[in-house]
């Protein structure tokens, strides 16, 4: 008995922003790799993200393991972008005094008349 060995492409695709997603879902490769690195099995990942099929999780993890250095470069670039975005947002929307303003607002609203 013989059969043809067919290689399926990994279930990974980049969205319009260049974010790699798994199996046409909103689950990112970043999320999948982080779960794997922290000890989650493919089964646990598939349970945690019901949009993913177990076969797609295994395939994406296999791709990661075969292309670890390229994926690590991609993940590092994503982290740099995330850090830059966070710093930009913190500069545009400083959080200093937010707690004090919220407490003052609560106290002001709590002393108003109720009729």
Image: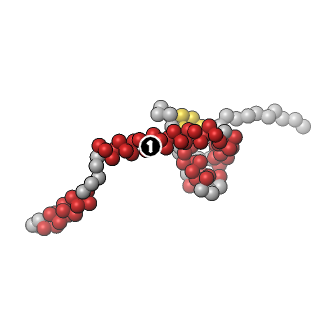
Q: Where is residue 102 in the image (x, y as percent from the top left)?
A: 23, 60
User: What residue appears at the point 35 percent right and 42 percent down from the top-left corner?
Assistant: 88
Q: Is residue 11 visible?
A: no
Q: Nearer the viewer, residue 36 or 95?
A: 95
Query: Compared to 18, does 27 lie above or below?
Result: below
Q: Which of 110 and 5 is in front in this view?
A: 110
- The residue positioned farthest toward the right in the image shown: 1
User: What residue appears at the point 64 percent right and 40 percent down from the top-left corner?
Assistant: 69
Q: Can residue 58 be seen in this view?
A: yes
Q: Where is residue 9 in the image (x, y as percent from the top left)?
A: 67, 34
Find numbered disc 1 in the image and state the secondary structure of the residue it sits on. helix
Quarter holding residue 92: top left
Query: Compared to 107, does 8 lie above or below?
Result: above
Query: Compared to 97, does 91 lie above or below?
Result: above
Please state, as top left, top right, bottom left or bottom right, where the N terminus lies in the image.
Answer: top right
Q: Mark 1 points at which residue?
A: 82
Please state, as top left, top right, bottom left or bottom right, where the C terminus lies in the image.
Answer: bottom left
Q: Which of 36 and 77 is in front in this view?
A: 77
User: What residue appears at the point 39 percent right and 45 percent down from the top-left corner?
Assistant: 86
């Amino acid at each position: 008995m013989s059969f043809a060995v067919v290689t399926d492409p990994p279930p990974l695709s980049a969205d319009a922003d260049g974010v790699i997603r798994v199996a046409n879902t909103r689950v990112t490769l970043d999320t999948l790799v982080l779960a794997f690195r922290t000890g989650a099995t493919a089964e646990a990942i598939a349970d945690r993200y019901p949009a993913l099929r177990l076969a797609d999780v295994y395939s994406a993890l296999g791709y990661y393991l075969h292309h670890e250095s390229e994926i690590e470069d991609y993940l590092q670039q994503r982290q740099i972008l995330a850090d830059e975005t966070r710093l930009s947002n913190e500069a545009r929307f400083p959080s200093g005094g937010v707690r004090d303003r919220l407490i003052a607002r609560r106290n002001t609203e709590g002393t108003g008349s109720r009729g």
